[in-house]
Amino acid sequence: MKKIMTAFALSASLSVQAAPIMNFFELGIAEGQNADYEKVAEYNIQTSLKNEKGTLAMYAVQPSEQPDMAYMIEIYADDAAYQTHRESPQYQAFLAQSPTILTDHKVFTPLVPQFLGDKKVQTTAPYRTNLVMVEVKPQHNADFKRIVSQEMAQSLETENGVLAMYAATYQNQPNKWLFFEIYADDAAYQAHRQTPHFQAYLKDTAAMLESKDYRTVQPLYLGNQGGVSWTAR
């Protein structure tokens, strides 16, 4: 059984049997519109998390060396929660302003969540964010999923500085994975890399990978409900 455990787990709006929704957006920012984009993204995230119990996390980040590009990672309790967000005033306001603040470069990637785990994040903290795309040899995908899920769960349980770890596969390419991670700071990330469970993960999955694309990203605005713990079965 697929389960979501959050602070809202007892709410009728969040079914414990629901399949969560995870989306990844790559957006081009129009010249001179960075400040306006950040303002609109912040308002959208703040308002959505405040008013929508089924909106579990929204993260606006930016490639460190590409100020004209932005990424958005979204997680919803289920499809109904996602549709509620799409109809919300703040999302409609974002759509209304997007022709001015965004370029024609808009790439939407629907994902299939495999592991979701987080703690509450504060918007003003100096977090370290990581975005990684991995392609796994198809014959190893099941073993890779098991190893990744175990490593992420252990990291969240044993490391105070690990605040969020999400793993999902591309909807139309199940052996292509996306990881998004949040650490308290750079020191927490470096400490994580030295842990026995992370070192074991590197060793156990090295031969399973076709490719790995690590993207250095900086947070623009991060928000979540906190307390999500979910693994696909």
Image (cartoon, grey):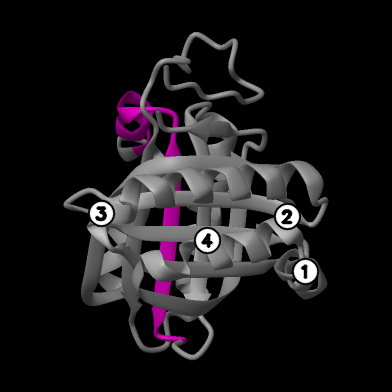
Is residue 174 in view from this perspective? yes
Tag in front: 2 or 1: 2
Which quadrant of the figure has residue 150?
A: top right
Q: Tell me how far mark 3 sits from mark 1, CA to CA.
A: 36 Å
Instruction: From the viewer's side, name the closer residue of 36 and 229.
Output: 229
Tag in front: 4 or 2: 4
Q: Secondary structure at mark 1?
A: loop
Q: Is residue 66 above or below residue 189?
A: below
- The answer to whether the residues at label 3 and label 2 have Cβ atoms under 8 Å apart is no
* Mark closest to the chain's N terminus, 4 or 1: 1
Q: Which residues are magenta?
A: 67-85
Tag in front: 4 or 1: 4
The residue pinned by badge 2 equals: 162
Tag in front: 3 or 2: 3
* Mark closest to the chain's N terminus, 3 or 1: 3
The residue pinned by badge 3 equals: 139
At horizontal 40% and vertical 75% (from top left) the residue drawn is 212
What amino acid is labelled 1 in the image? Answer: Asp
Q: Tell me how far mark 4 sits from mark 1, CA to CA.
A: 26 Å
The residue pinned by badge 4 equals: 204
Q: Tell me how far mark 3 sits from mark 4, CA to CA.
A: 15 Å
Q: Tell me how far mark 3 sits from mark 2, CA to CA.
A: 30 Å
Whether residue 37 appears in magenta in the rendering, the answer is no
Which quadrant of the figure contains the C terminus?
top left
Counting from the top left corner in percent of width and height, residue 124 is at 76, 61
Q: Secondary structure at mark 2?
A: strand
Q: Tell me how far mark 2 sits from mark 1, CA to CA.
A: 9 Å
Q: Is residue 144 above or below residue 129?
A: above
The residue pinned by badge 1 equals: 185
